[in-house]
Image (cartoon, rainbow, N blue to C red):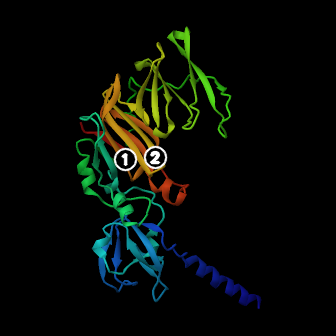
Amino acid sequence: MKAKLNILFIVVFLFSAFAKAQLKTGHCYFINAENGLNLREGPSVNHKVVGKYSYGSQVKVIENVPSVGKTFVIDNGKKIHGSWVRVEPTFNSDYYKNTRLYLFDAYLSKHLTTIPPQSLHNFVELYDSAAHDDYKPTKGVSSRREMWETGTHCDVRYEYNPAAKEALKDIIQFEIVNREDYINKKIIGNYEIDTSWQPKKFKLENDYRPVEWEQYYLPLNGGKDSVLIKDNLGEWASKTEYYGQIDELDSYLISGFAEDAEVILVNRTTGKRSMLSSGFPTISPNGEYLIAEYYNGFDYTTYFSVGEFDEEAIPQGAFITFSSWITAGEFFWIAENEFIMGVLPMDNVTLYGEELKDSKVIYLKGTIQF
């Protein structure tokens, strides 16, 4: 009897090792096959190929198909086990109207660990503020808008949009690079933020909870005077963070209204406050350009602005809401119009509220085109 139980255990173990958990119906998944994945009109390799989805495309799983016959494929000499699922496209769905579509689920996943190079420029909206007093949006070319209009409700978009790169060709371009190839080209410019001094903070008495609100003093005119900075209380309360100071601008940097990710300059001589950017700012080495970015958790996009820097006014240029990546980690300049920026695939922080713990930062080289 013991021998039979051991054999049963081995059989169950082997079955478990090859079995793959069913995907959740109604959920969206990414194609994680680097060379793309064939879309078939039936649940087997014997059925006709009706299309091919590129790496990073999304589909919604409609049905898990009961296994019939072979449930594996040979990929580079390795046996890859999986099942067939019926899917629904989340993009260009009219193209496959009234057609049942099937994919092999071994190449579907909730997350991507790399960003499809062709999707680096995908965006939802583009505002050109250089020539207008008021922002006039240019319609974006990301498919996320179509996603919501068609009701597929997948959170992140990676489909190939060649029009996105074309739309930004005179503004900014990106490419995936190896950080180590550029770290020795890093430029320390005149507008670095000095964080060596930090103000002493005091509790701000109030009845607004649960946050502990604070206040602090910034010295002015060489310490002869000071200005009091308080957290913003009331209906639209927000913390007022201290970021550091920029000697070239003779100013401190603090946060303003948190929901708009405002960054405020406080003059170290006069105490005058002025708006610098929406999003955390970086100024190019010689002060020609200002870039600012922040992640907007309300619409799952990266708010990114780039413009010519003017110390007396908010930079005028382009305001772009990117939909394929979120900034993460290091940022440094390698030329007056070129920088290296760490990012993560957007879905790592948005899709189903999950985080991918083992994600590695991907580095982009950005080139300002104007």
Depicted 354 relative to depicted 244: above or below: below
In the visual, does 235 lie left or right of 3? Answer: left
Check whether the beta carbons of the residues at disc 2 and disc 1 lie within 8 A of each other.
Answer: yes
**SS at badge 1:** strand
The front one of 246 and 273 is 273
Expressed as whole percent of the image width and height from the top left, the position of residue 260 reads: 45, 38
Q: What's under tag 1, amino acid-wise?
A: Thr
Expressed as whole percent of the image width and height from the top left, the position of residue 155 reads: 44, 59
Query: Dot 1, crowdedness within 10 Å: few (<14), some or many (≥20)?
Result: many
In the image, which disc is placed on residue 321? 1
Expressed as whole percent of the image width and height from the top left, the position of residue 257 reads: 49, 34
Picture quadrant of residue 31: bottom left
Depicted 127 relative to depicted 81: above or below: above
Query: Dot 2, crowdedness within 10 Å: few (<14), some or many (≥20)?
Result: some
Q: Earlier in the sequence, mark 2 or mark 1?
A: 2
Depicted 215 relative to depicted 162: above or below: above
Image quadrant holding the N terminus, namely: bottom right
Q: What's under tag 2, amino acid-wise?
A: Asn
Depicted 357 relative to depicted 64: above or below: above
Residue holding disc 2: 296
Tell me how far mark 2 sits from mark 1, CA to CA: 9 Å
The front one of 369 and 183 is 369
